[in-house]
Image (cartoon, rainbow, N blue to C red):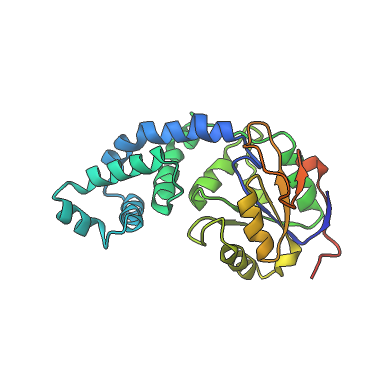
Amino acid sequence: MQVEAQGVLLDVEGTTSSVKFVYDVMFPFARRELAAYLQQSWDDPSCQAACEQVAGDAGQPSLAAWADAEDRAPRDLVEEEATRLMDADQKATGLKQLQGLIWKSGFESGEMVAHVYPDVPPALDRWRAAGADLRIYSSGSIQAQQLFFGHTQQGDLLPLFSGHYDTTTGPKREAASYAAIAADWRLPPASILFLSDITAELDAAREAGMQTGLLIRPDNAPVEPGHGHTEVASFAEILIDFKNPSS
């Protein structure tokens, strides 16, 4: 795959990291530690903000109003709703914020070390050295992204990235989200290459004017033919000219 671009926007799960690491390590850790985290950190502003977002995602005017209406403890409502969202594999913003806060302790203690594919770090180094602007767009919260790339098997990769986006920008399967990212980036959409393993995300990015590449990684879900995105199995297959970007 050969393209001209100024920036590279990267998905995480199934693109830079194995789906199995996210589902077999990160999600179970958040589920296991949810109750303890809520109990220990309930009064922390970051926890309260995430819990208010959980209430908002559930269609409630506020956490207090929700608790009053249900005549239940707010913490119990948040724990129950977060568990329900995890059971349904929902990408709700409040849940992702909570998960990011829980993962913080796991990464900082060394209990979790993020998996990245071996082709990723050298490609990131190569692209940065060539003048690329690298950014992440994931359903995981910005905090979770920063923790993830700051604690990988290949060391601290966080300095390689100059920006992060999550679902507070918008859903990953809507073109408006990618238009908003390009506007924030101050780059023409056509000068940005978006890499993901999900064709619906790539469709949305392409609709917004971005270039796209579909990662075919081990354990990724099969893709339907005829999607129209260039398929690559490794970042090593992606050759980018950063000197003469599309406009």
* Rendered location of residue 84, percent (x, y): 34, 41
Quadrant where the C terminus lies? Answer: bottom right
Residue under the point 76% across and 52% down: 128
Q: Is residue 48 above or below residue 34?
A: below
Q: Taking the image as drawn, is residue 110 in sight?
A: no
Residue 8 lies, in percent from the top left, at 71, 55
Q: Residue at x 37, y 31 (%)?
A: 32
Q: Nearer the viewer, residue 220 or 228?
A: 228
Counting from the top left corner in percent of width and height, residue 170 is at: 51, 61
Q: Is residue 104 above or below residue 226?
A: above
Left or right: 42 as drawn, with respect to 183: left
Residue 133 sits above or below residue 237 on the image: below
* Residue that extends furthest to the left in the rendered view of this protein: 71
In this picture, is 57 found above or below 118?
Answer: below
Q: Quadrant of residue 79?
A: top left
Q: Is residue 207 left or right of residue 40?
A: right
Q: Nearer the viewer, residue 140 or 198?
A: 198
Residue 192: quarter of image: bottom right
Q: Does residue 10 appear in this view?
A: yes
Residue shown at 62%/34% (left/top)?
18
Q: Image check: 115 left or right of 229? A: left
Residue 39 drawn at (x, y percent): 26, 39
Seen in the image, is 6 located left or right of residue 58? right
